[in-house]
Amino acid sequence: MISSSTADVDTIAAVATPPGVGAIGIVRLSGPGAKDILSHIFLPLSPTFENFRPWRLHRGRVLDWNGFALDDVLAVFMPAPRTFTGEDTAEIHCHGGPVVVQAVLESVLRHGARQAHRGEFSRRAFVNGRMDLSQAEAVAELIAAPSREAMRYGMNRLEGLLGQRTRELSAKLEALRASLCLAVDFPEEETEELEPTALCASIDDVVSALQRLLSGSRRANVIQQGAQVVLAGAVNAGKSSLLNALLGRNRALVTDIPGTTRDYLEESCDLAGLPVRLIDTAGLRQGVGPVERLGVARSREKMTQADAVLLVLDGERLGEDGASSTFCPDPAAAEVFDAVGTTPLLVVWNKCDVCMPAVFPPFWIGQHPCCAVSALSGTHVDELAANLREILLSAAGKDLSDDGLAPNARQALALEAALQELQALRADVLAGQPYDCCAVRLEMACAHLGEVTGLSSPAEVLDSIFAHFCIGK
């Protein structure tokens, strides 16, 4: 456990609600002087007021440093240690106008509190053992969650599931390290469990668990940061119309003139809780002018960066016989097939209300998933969105029955370092390295796992993490 420094025993205060106008604004205090400061600036209205009965809202007036009433408020005092920070905590719930909130905060600061730094409330909760570092990070991630799925991942970390899992793995490694040290100190007591095959089996068990957690990290990146989906295809295939249909509004300019889209257009949408950045690109074709040629080059570049590609086909131009050929009749589509590589590809037969092929899906799309839509009328666009969501989640390794454990980028780096140590340890064991050398690798793996929960995180790492929090958290 990280001990509190002398600088952390003062009382801090900050506005805990977002900036701007609102019905309610909250000023929060934490530290040994929270109750005393609240007593100096709060004038109760109830004749039965009893010196801030804990965990109970009291109505009264909050006063400025000259004793003048600022606002009609509700105040609550929460004694340590059963608070968010583990310290005495107080909150003043005032009206949410910016001037009112700042006046209340100024009164609190003039009576002895200090303005909190970014993330200082959460940092005190971590220092005082109210949560581990993975839970503290989850506070900020839950606040910034862009979707319900991201909320679920953040909530699971906030409840301590990730920290619990890493502590369980650390306990297994510590037990294994103790056995190795015992074998080194008392070689005559060597047992069957310390045979190389048994050691490797124990290591493999932890390695598999770490790999599952890291798979969750890849899922979280898509869930929290959003997947990048590129709409590609020939000119006038209907990419811009499809973008508008998926967004539910007219965002892209749509005309019958070939080459209307000269540059890519990026917009965000939500696919049933999955944030997605849709990128409408210039139509792929040869023999164009210099401006459109630049747009086509950017289209090709965006395809290489995509998490998935929607290949939009012009069903009206391809006609009813567009599926009968074994060779791709659309040069733009052929280029997309060659360019995507392993990137997930969903083929969209657009303008299905005008023309549907005799054979669907077309032979030449191979094993790629395919669906038919009408971007202009909205026919089957909902089914397309659902298919796209499943493709993105599958590509990210998303199992709909998973437990929602997904490390963030910092935690994933620590888990990867622990995994590398264990893989090197396994090689050492099979190579017949002395057990005392093997124990060192186990110690390093445990240290890396400790970085997830903050047990072995240096102060500069903590400073960097909490600097990204809002001031009131």
Image: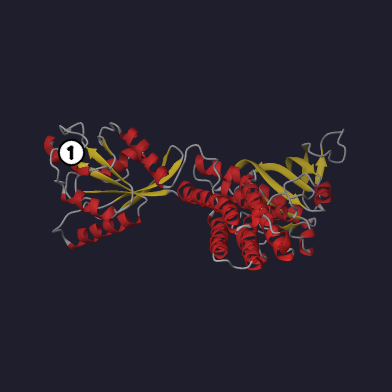
Q: Residue 401 appears at what percent x and percent y? A: 50, 37
Q: Nearer the viewer, residue 65 or 403?
A: 403
Can you give x and y, in whole percent of width and height, for residue 316 in the image? 15, 38
Residue to which mark 1 is pinned: 315
Say which of 468 and 319 sits in front: 319
Indicate whether 30 appears above or below 391: below
- Judge whether residue 472 can be spotted in this image: no
Report how many numbered discs are placed on residues in the image: 1
In depth, the one of 285 and 330 nearer the eye is: 330
Residue 259 x/y as whole percent: 19, 51
In the rendered view, does 174 fall on the left or right side of 53?
left
Name the residue at 44% across, 46% down.
397
Q: Position of residue 441 (x, y in %)?
A: 61, 64
The colour scheme is secondary structure
Residue at 13 percent of width and 34 percent of height: 320
Q: Amino acid at mark 1?
A: Gly
Q: Residues within 10 Å of mark 1 (few under 14, many from 20)?
A: many
Q: In which quadrant is the N terminus drawn?
A: bottom right
Answer yes or no: is residue 325 visible.
yes
Question: Residue 240 vs residue 91: left or right?
Answer: left
Question: Is the residue 71 above or below the residue 197 in the image?
Answer: above
Q: Nearer the viewer, residue 86 or 11?
A: 86
Q: Please say if 433 is above or below 271.
A: below
Q: For the view shown, which residue lies furthest in the front direction?
A: 188
